[in-house]
Amino acid sequence: MIVVMKPGAIPQQIEHVKERIEQLDLRWHVIEGTERTVVAALGEKRDGAKQSLELCEGVEKVVAILAPYKMASTEVKREPTVVQALDLKVGGGHIGVIAGPCSVESRDQILEIAHLVKQMGGKALRGGAFKPRTSPYSFQGLKEKGLQFLAEARAQTGLAVVTEVMAPEQVELVSAYADVLQVGARNMQNYPLLEAVGASGLAVLLKRGASATMEEFLLAAEYILKTGNTKVMLCERGIRTFEDHTRFTLPLASVPYLHQTTHLPVVVDPSHGTGKASLVAPMARAAIAAGADGLIIEIHPNPEKALSDGFQALTPGAFRQMMTECRKIAAVMGMHMGQD
Ligand code: PEP
Ligand code: MN
């Protein structure tokens, strides 16, 4: 349920509603809007709870939340959530660009790419140190050494570090270096991991599972939100279909759909979404036109030599061109894309 307070409700009245919610064995979550405050009451439905809350002073109405994802839903919060980590701002009219290699391969590689990303207007550096690889014989990442190189790149450029964490027991280590924890597609329904990244308090980039429905995706986000961590970015990275002209199928309708159903910002990953470097920039442009709040792009100075996903990496020149084109589309859409 959501308890909608009257526009002039005073803090004591909100406190009282919170106490009443606790007495009803429910959990509260306060959302301060620009015009009024709403208090979400979460938990098992209780007989008489709605009527009891309606009687509290300062309450305008109590309404049921129909969506199964309570805290992610626009029913609870209509204003878009803006997620910020250092200079990366995603949501509410800000388009944040996250770019970098698929994997951190060496100190020189990540420092070189970090400077390129910075020069070209990206606000965050991506790079996997713990890599989820389909084959156990493929490069698995530099692990803590990779995290140290990422932190050095942040120190040199000021870019926020976005990097994947694959297991709950890695959260503490990765959090010591990252600004944004990435939960990969293969882990979207790893519930202990979702709770652990939530508890870290860091911003989280949650990737859609390759066969997850929108409802499953939003319920995964709900696991993070339920810990009290509201800094969640959703990432559409493509789904598995019968199509084989691309690595995955990138369904851009999920961007406006998510904007209708959730206040959380939506980032698009056209690199994994297409798996082909030549298709990345057109789909990045389309993502911005569809209203995406951010992009995550794989780039590499020498894609042929990349240790993972070289086939979908943009060269620095192609990335520069993509940024120029995307900025034009962002301007038409009335969005800021990292130059302010
Ligand atoms: C990645 O971003 O490098 C990655 C492994 O992505 P996904 O989890 O979407 O496959
Ligand atoms: Mn990759």
Image (tube, rainbow, N blue to C red):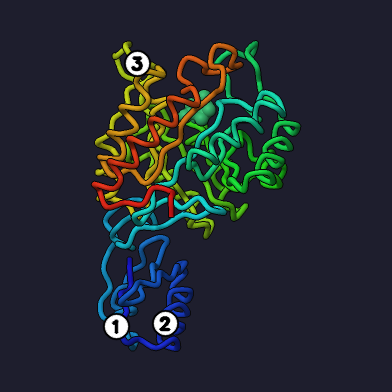
Q: Residue 61: where, in percent of width, then height? A: 25, 77
Marks 2 and 1, Cα distance to the nearest angstrom? Answer: 12 Å
Mark 3 or mark 2: name the one nearer the start of the chain: 2
The residue to which callout 2 is attached is: 14
Q: In this view, does 334 lie to the left or right of 94?
A: left
Nearer mark to the viewer, of 3 and 2:
3
The residue to which callout 3 is attached is: 246
Q: What element carries label 3?
A: loop
Residue that appears at 49% across and 27% down: 298
**Amino acid marked by disc 1:** Pro
Residue that appears at 45% across and 88% down: 12
Residue that appears at 30% across and 77% down: 35
116 or 178, which is in the foreground? Answer: 116
Count of numbered tags = 3
**Does the rendering let one see residue 49?**
no
In which quadrant is the C terminus drawn? Answer: bottom left
Question: Which numbered tag is attached to residue 73?
Answer: none
**Amino acid marked by disc 2:** Ile
Q: Quadrant of residue 236?
A: top left
Q: What element carries label 1?
A: loop
**Amino acid marked by disc 3:** Thr
Mark 2 or mark 1: name the one nearer the start of the chain: 1
Question: Which numbered tag is attached to residue 7?
Answer: 1
216 or 110, which is in the foreground? Answer: 110
Q: Residue 286: where, in percent of width, then height? A: 27, 33
**Does the rendering let one see residue 109?**
yes
Q: In this view, does 212 lie above or below 4?
A: above
User: Callout 3: 10 Å neighbours few (<14), some, many (20+)?
Assistant: some
Q: Is mark 2 on a helix, strand or loop?
A: helix
Q: Residue 139: where, in percent of width, then height? A: 65, 16
Q: Residue 247: where, in percent of width, then height? A: 39, 16
In which quadrant is the N terminus drawn? Answer: bottom left
